[in-house]
Image (cartoon, rainbow, N blue to C red):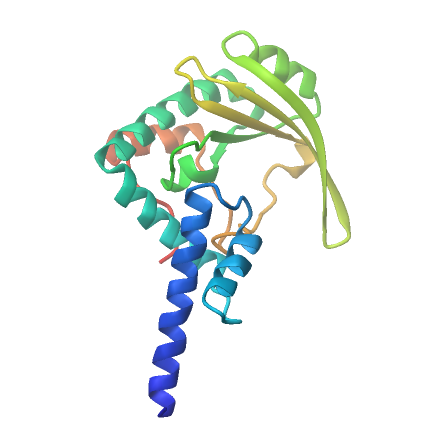
Amino acid sequence: MPNGDALSFDSELKCRVAREAATLLYFGAEKEYKQAKQKAAQTFGTHFLPSNLEVALELDKIAEENEGPIRKERLIQMRHEALNTMRLLAEFYPVLVGSVWRGTIKQGSDIDIAVYSDDAVEILTILKTTNEVLKTAWTSVNKCGVTLVSFHIYAQTQAGYGLEIVVRGFDEKGKKRKCEIFGDELRGLSIRELQQILKTNPVQQFIPK
C-alpha cells in the first residue's frame, strides 16, 4: 500500500474508532472516555486511539442526529435554569461550565456550575431554598503534585434538570484550568456573559474546531 494510502486508511480507521467510542458514551455502554476509546479500538482490532476532542466532536454529532430540534430547545431551557441558579449564588462568583456551557448537551446531561467560597454550608443552605438537594460529597484531585479539594452539591432544579454545584476555595478563583476533554481553557460563562448569550445566540456552542 503506498504511503499516502496508508495514511488515509489510518485516518479513516481513527475516525471510525472515535465514532464508535462516542456511540458507547452516548448510549451509556461506557462512562469514561478512556475506557470507551479502548473498547472501540478493540472492536476494530487496532491500536489507534483518537483524542478526547475527536470523540467529543463525534458525540456532539450523534446527540444532534438522535435528538433533533428538541435538543436546542432543551439547551435554552437549561441555560435559563442555570442563570436562575447563578443569580441565586451571585455573591460566590458562579461560572457555568460543562455541556450546558459548551452547548453539547445530550439526554441525561445536567447543569454544572462552579462557585468560589470557603463556606460550603452557606451555599448548601441557599440552594435548599429553591432546589431539591439530593446528595453532597467532598472530592480531592491531585494536579501536578497539588491536592485540590472541592465540595459537590447534587440537586434538581424546579424544572426537573439535574444540577451539580462545585464549591471551590476562594483562593482558586481566577486560576486557569485546562479541559481534559476538549483540550482548551475551561473558561465557562459568568452571569453577565450567559445573559448576553441568551439574548443574542441562545444555542451558541463553545467548542474548539
Q: Name the residue rendered at 73%, 55% in the picture.
A: 144
The total of numbered circles placed on residues is: 0
Residue furthest bottom in the image: 2
In what quadrant of the picture does the N terminus appear?
bottom left
Q: Name the residue rendered at 41%, 35% in the picture.
A: 100
In what quadrant of the picture does the C terminus appear?
bottom left
108 with respect to 71 (left or right): right
| Placement of 194 over or under 130, stated as above or below | below
| Placement of 192 over or under 187, stated as above or below | above
45 with respect to 71 (left or right): right
115 with respect to 16 (left or right): right
For residue 26, what is the image quadrant?
Answer: top left
Q: Name the residue rendered at 54%, 7% in the picture.
A: 129
Is residue 202 in view? no
* Residue 12 image position (x, y, % from top left): 35, 71
Q: Nearer the viewer, residue 165 or 199?
A: 165
| Placement of 89 over or under 39, stated as above or below | above
* Residue 103 image position (x, y, % from top left): 36, 40
* Residue 140 image position (x, y, % from top left): 73, 38
Is residue 95 in view? yes
Q: Nearer the viewer, residue 70 or 78?
A: 70
For residue 139, what is the image quadrant?
Answer: top right
Q: Nearer the viewer, residue 42 or 67?
A: 42
* Residue 193 image position (x, y, % from top left): 38, 34
Residue furthest left in the image: 69
